Image (cartoon, rainbow, N blue to C red):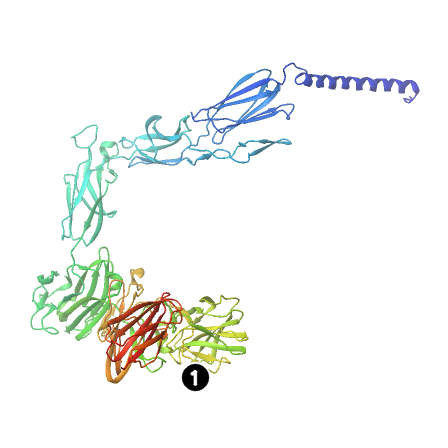
Amino acid sequence: MNYFTKPYLSAICFLLLSLMMVFQAEAIANTADELSNTLFRPNATSVTVTCQVTLNSGESPEGTFITLTGVNNPALYFEGVAPESGTVVFTGVTEANYRLNAVLEGYYELDTLITIQSNKLIPVNLLEITHNPSSLTVDSVSLRAYWQPVPLQNRHRFSGQPYVKPMGNKSLAMGSPKGGAVSVNRSFTGYAVFLDGILQGNTFDTSFVFEPLVYGQSYLAGVAAVYTSGYSEVDTCRFTSGFLFPPQNLTGETLPLVDYSFLAWEAPENPQYPGQAVPGLTAYRIYRNQELIAEVASDTTEFYDLNLLHGHYSYEITAIYDLTLYGYPSETGESKKTEPAEISIVYDGYQLPFTENFNTGLFETNQWTVEGSNWRIAGQAGNPAPAVEFYFSPVQMDYSFSLTSFYIDCIDIIDGDIMLDFDLKLDDVNATGRDSLLVEILTEDSQFIVASFSNQGDIEWITHSVSITDYVKGHVFRLRLIAKGENSLDIYNWQIDNINVYRECAPPRDFSVLDGLYSSPGFKLIWRPPFGNPTETWIKWDYGTNKAGFGLPTGGTFNVASRFYADQLEYLAGGNLTKIRIFPVSPNATLILKVWKGYDGSSLVFSQPIDSYVAGEWNEFTLSSPVQVERNTLWIGYEVTHSGSDSVAGFDYGPVVSGMSDMISYDGIVWETVSSQSGLKFNWNIQGFIEKPEESKVYASNTSGSANFYNNDPNPEIRKHRDIIGYNIYRDNTLIATTPDLFYFDNCFFIESTYYIEYDIKAIFEDCESELVNVTLWAEQPMCAVGVSYELTEDLKIYPNPSTGLIYVDTRDLSGSVQVYSFSGKLLLDRAVAKNEKPVLWLHDFPDGAYLVKFVSDTGETLIGKVLLKK
């Protein structure tokens, strides 16, 4: 059949046209409905919607963000933020179907559909987001419940730019557009604790103790967070009670200078049956510092803990029960521990030094504790007599007997080494090696054998010296001598004499005086620190201030260095040079840090170009790789390359330590002193930082083959030496200076005849001083001002000199004060000097003789000179 004939085509066109008219009519109808909801309803733009916001927590709803969005037309959009009253009013709302959304942080979001056809009041109630405690557990013995807390952070209301919530192809603002922030605490009010569903109490803690429960019975514990809006979900756990009534009211006490504590307590009691014994009680267990030390019968409520060392002790007690009456035949149970009783045993021990030579013939004199009858004081033997001895008689088999000192107090000692010296002698009979004498240290909670001797033949009197610093510093301790063996007939006796416990603070080493090296008269004193100190230090020759810079007249390259001999660095051998300080005066030079070794400095061992530096001040550089300090001469310095007449290499005011602090080389191989080249006398401003690993403690002792000395190092943090505060320097028994450096210049002037001069030095620690170390030399008659600071930078220029009374002083146009001293140290004149002033002093009224003139600038620079007055 042909469907494309004219009649058929006409029919098909009619059908399609009819369908199009139907669809168009439906669309027009839908549009009409929508318009009827908007434009064509009377008063459509005058509807007012009021939202009244409340919170189930009872808090203020301020900050709640509310939006109204048309369901069929998202262009219909209204938003507002609730004030404290919670009332949000929207005016001019077009009647339609809307989605109402309310958001406040910390509360569940409200999102609902609502139809608005007239003025409307909409109640909005937000429910608080609550959190549940978790991981509830119960200690079945103590009945204490524990749980993890709920988050309690503050919630912060929206501020600034609103948070944007995507919704389809439109973004809805969820935050307040107004500025500022409001921080509000959650309405959390604590935790509610339940037992078998019954409320037991409330707490802000994350633990709770249930009242006494029946032993062996199962219970269901629960905990919920409490908010003003109500409880959170309850977290639960099931447990079986192991509760047994504990002892009550534990107390502890001790008396001064005793070695025991006294404990007392009361028997357990069931509060429901006051005054009645708790069934099944059989014993008490006593714990000291959480360790079980005793178990006593149930009719005992007191206990003496004897033979305690100096220290702090914490006691707790539990009750032991026969559980037959609780339904568990032949079983025992232990209650929880009491609250601890704290006791401190304090002895007024002997202070250092402690010396015992047994001259009184009595152990009681220094309160020794004697075990056994073999220990005695031998009046006719000793080094010299008398001495203490362990005698073979009465004969002992498999024996061990001790002699123990009273307490010796080292609690407050900070610095220095604590030494134990004693003399020992053995008269042997059979050299079995099975009889011995032990030297032991007893502290509050430990004991250490620091020396032992065995009978392998006679031992003549010999003095032993043992460092016990690691064991006793910071403690009260006792010294114990233990004689032990298989058969006391194998020896005749052990003898001990001249026991001495003392503190030793190490003195400076290699104290010496350099003379004849300076442009100005005087002495430079140098020394090395005590053994073991310091583990890190700056080594230098300069005085720390810069006078000027050195350069070549037309530019070029040269090297400068400070030299340190091997014996001067012996105490730092094994350490590493890790940093170098220099004082470059002019900019625009090329600098290379360098280190040489060898007596003549011909061996370059390190080189490091300097990328940049700051002219006119100290610059500190860390070496790219450390240079090990060996028993070899060390040269520390740098290479300078500059153009023109720049003065680059900084130097101080002197006086110079010639041949050490003023070395210069133009090729880095051949070295000379600056004074030999130019006549200038100064020290390069070059300093090196050396770090030395902490050395292991070495115990010094004169021993025989039968002795052993121990180094258990129980407290390595105590072993480390404290930093030295400084050194006191004395001239002819008069203190002239205290300095932290390893050198000092004493500006003495010499006239007329010869004279002995003596210098002494001691190291000063925080709580001790070392012994004095001295050096005596023969010199021209020194005229030294006592009590004057001798931090010399350069001779003060005075003219005329000698003078008949009128002198001019060159203070380099600096402000400060100028002073005149007699050479006995008496201040004769002191006057202020203004900047750029040329001070003139009138000394005509003073007797003829030599006078010391000192100028101290306001910046701390010191200049010293001498003037001879001849009228």
Q: Quadrant of the C terminus?
A: bottom left
Quarter residue 488 falls in = bottom left
Q: Nearer the viewer, residue 389 or 599?
A: 599
Q: Residue at x 28, y 35 (%)?
A: 242
Q: Position of residue 352 (x, y in %)?
A: 18, 63
868 horizontally vs 179: left or right? left
Element under label 1? helix
Q: Position of residue 49 (x, y in %)?
A: 56, 19
Q: Position of residue 787 (x, y in %)?
A: 25, 70
217 horizontally vs 361: left or right? right
Say if residue 348 shows up in the picture.
Answer: yes
Q: Nearer the viewer, residue 839 or 113?
A: 839
Q: Nearer the viewer, residue 195 or 811?
A: 811
Q: Which amino acid, mark 1?
A: Ser
Q: Position of residue 576 (x, y in %)?
A: 41, 70
Q: Residue at x 79, y 17 (%)?
A: 21
Residue extending furthest toward the top:
42
Quarter residue 37 falls in = top right
Q: Nearer the viewer, residue 139 or 474?
A: 474
Residue that label 1 marks: 676
718 horizontally vs 542: left or right? left
Quarter residue 809 falls in = bottom left
Measured along the vertical axis of the image, is residue 307 above or below residue 493? above
Measured along the vertical axis of the image, is residue 587 above or below residue 260? below
Say if residue 737 shows up in the picture.
Answer: no
Q: Quadrant of the N terminus?
A: top right
Residue extending furthest toward the bottom:
753
Q: Residue at x 24, y 40 (%)?
A: 339
Measured along the vertical axis of the image, is residue 704 above or below residue 202? below
